[in-house]
Image (cartoon, helix red, strand yellow):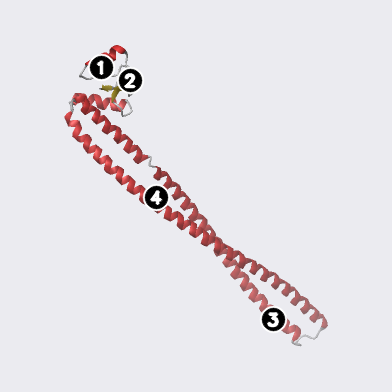
Amino acid sequence: MDQLELLYALQQKDTELQSLREQEENHPLKSEAEELRVALENAEAELEAKRAELANAQAAQKKQETELDSLSRKIKGEEEKLYGGVVANPKELRGLQAEVKFLGKKRDDLETRILESMEAIEQMSADIARLTGERDAKQAKLADVEKKLEQELATLAERIAAVEAEKAELRPQLPAELLATYDTLLRQKHNLAAVKVVGGVCQGCRMELPGQDYDRFKRTDGIFKCSTCGRILVK
């Protein structure tokens, strides 16, 4: 293999390395995993908010039940006064009747609110069960994507290491001056320093070589650069 063939082989390795590193950097599973992490965070936040809402509702219901218990004892005491013969004064009896009626209405309203609270708590519990299931599904999906991403990145890393090793074998076979020129062009020309000429067209800039240049290129065995883009041309 002559120097230009070796150089083109080196270029192919550098081209492959660039492609592999771009795949590694821009792997679609990375963005998918990030989207899933955000969705999972949102699901956790929604679930936590619903749990806090449930805790507040349960505390409020407990307070209502305590109030109902107190109110029921108070009504019982007033009824004992009313029907126990302790109070004989008609005016006081009418007052007790009015108080018992008022307290009874208050108790009915409180019992209604407690029933409504129980229904709301039941719905919140159902919502929490649903949200927990959705959260768990997102966790499982994220775990699957992260595992697959890890495996695919490991495969890419292995291939990158292999191509780097192949490059390391090629470079010592080339003259230092030619390598220096190649490395400079590689930096300047977006990782494409040595290219083929196909049908008189430079595959780097896609421009057709002038007829005289193309004739000289076909006749020369040495280094020949494209007059348009400056890349090293290879037969």
Q: Which label's residue is closer to the chain start, 1 or 2? A: 2
Q: Which residue is mark 2?
A: 201
Query: Which marked residue is nearer to the observer: mark 1 or mark 4?
Result: 1
| Extreme residue toward the front, this view | 199
Mark 4: which amino acid? Answer: Val
Q: What percent of the width, then of the height, locates residue 160? A: 27, 40
Rounded to the nearest angstrom, the CA distance separating label 3 from label 1 is: 113 Å
Q: x, y percentage for residue 199? A: 31, 20
Residue placed under numbered mark 1 in the picture: 217
**In the rendered image of this protein, does residue 149 appear above or below residue 49?**
above
* Residue in the foreground of this view, choosing between 124 and 11: 11
N-term mark: 4 or 3: 3
Q: Which amino acid type is marked by label 2?
A: Val
Look at the image and tell me in which quarter the C terminus lies: top left
Q: Earlier in the sequence, mark 3 or mark 2?
A: 3
Q: Earlier in the sequence, mark 1 or mark 4?
A: 4
Find the distance from the CA under tag 3 to the CA under tag 2: 105 Å
> As rendered, which of 215 and 33 lies closer to the eye?
215
Residue type beneath disc 3? Lys
Left or right: where 217 falls relative to 22: left
Which residue is labeled 4 in the image? 145
- Numbered disc in front, either 4 or 3: 4
CB within 8 Å, label 1 to label 4: no
- Give the label, 3 or 2, closer to the camera: 2
Q: Nearer the viewer, mark 3 or mark 1?
A: 1
